[in-house]
């Protein structure tokens, strides 16, 4: 397994600004930015990389985490609705009939893994730029409400 190290810039300023927001606003902000980052850097590239099928396109989406990070956690990729993508991604072994006739095999083409791995830097770059911008927009709206 490969270990990657990423640096997110401006975290001190972002954490200070998040202290001003209430819990619901903070959660909504984080989820919104996560969704936008995943849509731009995972969903769109995956949909363009995979062979076209309406069912395939519907099976590639962003879902909320049901585990420890259920409030803000999201994941993106191919869902279990697209079980056939497993065969494209990992291939199959050589299949034969009961009589020994060759039924062929599917050669693996790891498009999903390769696409997601190649876009991780884009997600980090997105957070470095857009998270702070989105936070600034919300803070400006909040200030406008307070000053009215």
Image: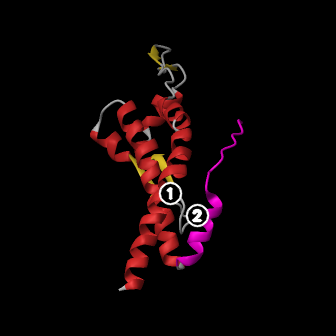
Name the side, left or right, on which 14 lies relative to 86: right
> Where is residue 26 drawn, in percent x and y?
52, 71
Mark 2, secondary structure of its residue: helix
Residue where numbered disc 1 is placed: 131
Task: Please name whichever residue, 123 or 148, is drawn nearer the observer in this view of the structure.
Answer: 148
Q: Position of residue 98 (x, y in %)?
A: 49, 21
- SS at circle 1: helix
Read off the residue under disc 2. Answer: 14
Q: Position of residue 104 (x, y in %)?
A: 46, 17
Which numbered disc, 2 or 1, marks the residue that appears first in the sequence? 2
Residue found at x 58% / y 64% = 14
**Is-magenta flag for residue 103?**
no
Q: Given contact means CB atoms under 8 Å apart, are the residues at marks 2 and 1 in contact?
A: yes
- 6 within the magenta span: yes
Within 10 Å of disc 1 (Cα), the crowding (few <14, some 14-19, many 20+) is many
Q: Is residue 82 above or below residue 118?
A: below
Camera-side residue of 125 and 24: 125
Q: 10 Å neighbourhood of mark 2: few (<14), some, or many (≥20)?
A: some
Task: Say which residue appears at 42% left-offset and 65% top-offset.
Answer: 137
Is 78 above or below relative to 72? above
Left or right: residue 142 versus residue 21 is: left
The residues tagged by marks 2 and 1 sit, at their Cα atoms, a distance apart of 8 Å
Which residue sits at x=33%, y=42%? 57
Q: The magenta stretch spans which residues? A: 1-21
Q: In the rendered view of the protein, which quadrant contains the N terminus?
A: top right
Q: Nearer the viewer, residue 24 or 75?
A: 24
- Residue 15: % across, % down: 62, 67
Count of numbered tags: 2
Image quarter for residue 68?
Answer: bottom right
């Amino acid at each position: 397994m490969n270990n990657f190290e990423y640096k997110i810039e401006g975290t001190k300023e972002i954490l200070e600004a998040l202290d001003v927001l209430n819990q619901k606003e903070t959660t909504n902000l984080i989820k919104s930015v996560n969704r936008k980052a995943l849509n731009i850097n995972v969903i769109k590239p995956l949909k363009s990389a995979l062979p076209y099928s309406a069912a395939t396109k519907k099976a590639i989406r962003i879902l909320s985490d049901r585990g420890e990070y259920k409030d803000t956690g999201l994941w993106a990729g191919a869902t279990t609705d697209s079980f056939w993508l497993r065969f494209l991604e990992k291939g199959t072994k050589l299949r034969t009939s009961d009589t020994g006739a060759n039924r062929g095999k599917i050669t693996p083409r790891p498009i999903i893994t390769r696409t997601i791995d190649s876009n991780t830097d884009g997600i980090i770059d997105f957070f470095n730029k857009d998270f702070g911008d989105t936070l600034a927009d919300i803070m400006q709206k909040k200030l406008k409400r307070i000053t009215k």
